Image (spheres, grey):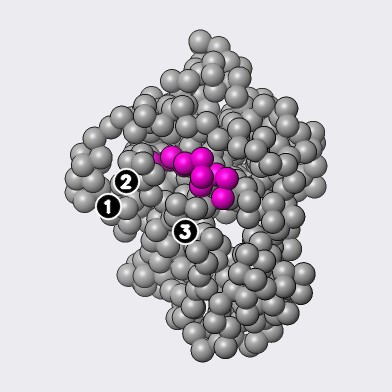
Amino acid sequence: MTTRRTLMQLGIAAAMAGAGMLALAPSHAASQEEPRKLSVANATVSTPPYAAYNTSVPMEIFFKEEGIDVQMLHMGGATVATQALGTGKVDIAVPASSAPLALLDKMPDAGIVGFYTFINGFQSMPVVLPDSPIADLKDLSGKTIGVQTLGNSQVQTTKALVQIAGGDAASLRFVAVGEGVEAAHALTTKRIDALVLFDGLYGQIEANGQALRRLSSSATGRDEVGFSGVIIARKKFLEENRDTFVRYGRAIAKSTVFAKANPEAAVRIHWKHFPETRMRGVSEEEAMRLALPSLKNRLDNVYEVDGMWGNSTLQQVKGYIRLNQLGGQLTKGESLERLWDPALMKEINDFDQEEIRVRARNWKP
């Protein structure tokens, strides 16, 4: 049975974001008695519909079918989730890749490894209003850019993208504008010149009627940059429980195929497990219209690499690391690449995709 708990329910204060201060339930020891029980730290307290493919859909269908018992914990940020894993309080963490890379940058012997890429594409390109005079990334020089929070990795990657485009990264001004209505209002009232969030949040803004124009960069092409979100584990625990992690990864891969084949079904499943994410005071049809774009936008950035779900090439990993290095988020070079280990990929992808698509198309609530 899959369960989910929040930090509040666990009685953990938000102030416990510092390393060594987390106090979650103990991680399952590597043993043969309970090899298929897993505790998973998600990087957000709330769980929006764009996360359905790696949360609610596997919770509803595929964790059980793969014979694993998953407890989902919801945390206040990628850094907190990564620290929970690094200190041995959870078995798996699901953060943006910048957080575990930053940990390895400071602690090369942290003993963590990424085994499944849950966001492949670069999903945080800056956006502007359709009639904005800003034509390309270089034009952002000297401009004010809104971000969700000033601690988000989008600050560093945007600096890097502007630098690559030939602009003046040092001249960028960043302000925190939140997300959704607040972020859109900051853009439409010209308090900011551009906005940098990510795919799912852009979908939410566009679903509410505000058109956005995405800037582009050849530096973030699919072959050049990937690995935006990686599922991580402690290397020793993964090695001792290899089959359990294959089953977990396969459940996520199957759920991704399911969500792509029937995103409306994925949203309805998500509402079942996270009813608070369904917009109140509107019809089901309207609630679906508002929820679908965020999931579809995210799924556009989740795709097979070399014919395998969850995979990344070494070039994609290097490209993502380079963006964070140029932005000042990371310092070390090739040693960071060892975060990624695709050893489980073939086993994770050993299932009948068409059978999953048929099930998705025929799914009934």
In the rendered image, which quarter is residue 264 located in? bottom left
- Where residue 234 sits in the image (x, y, percent)? 62, 27
Using residue 269 as the reference point, say whether residue 335 is left or right of it. Answer: right
Secondary structure beneath dot 1 equals helix
Badge 1: residue crowd in 10 Å (few <14, some 14–19, many ≥20) = some
Q: Quadrant where the N terminus lies?
A: top left
- Say which of marks 1 and 3 sits in front: 3
Q: Please give the range of residues in magenta.
A: 309-319
Using residue 171 as the reference point, say whether residue 61 is left or right of it. Answer: left
Q: Which residue is mark 2?
A: 257
Q: Which residue is mark 1?
A: 261
Contact (CB < 8 A) between labels 3 and 2?
no
| Residue type for callout 2 | Val
- Where residue 166 sits in the image (x, y, percent)? 65, 71
- Where residue 124 sits in the image (x, y, percent)? 56, 62
| Residue type for callout 1 | Ala
Q: Which residue is mark 3?
A: 221
- Distance from the alpha carbon under mark 3 to that under mark 2: 23 Å
Looking at the picture, tell me which residue is in the foreground, 346 or 207.
346
Secondary structure beneath dot 3 equals loop
Badge 3: residue crowd in 10 Å (few <14, some 14–19, many ≥20) = some
As displayed, is residue 131 above or below residue 115?
Answer: below
- Distance from the alpha carbon under mark 1 to that under mark 2: 6 Å
Using residue 144 as the reference point, say whether residue 266 is left or right of it. Answer: left
Q: Residue at x 62, y 48 (%)?
A: 321
| Residue type for callout 3 | Gly
Secondary structure beneath dot 2 equals helix
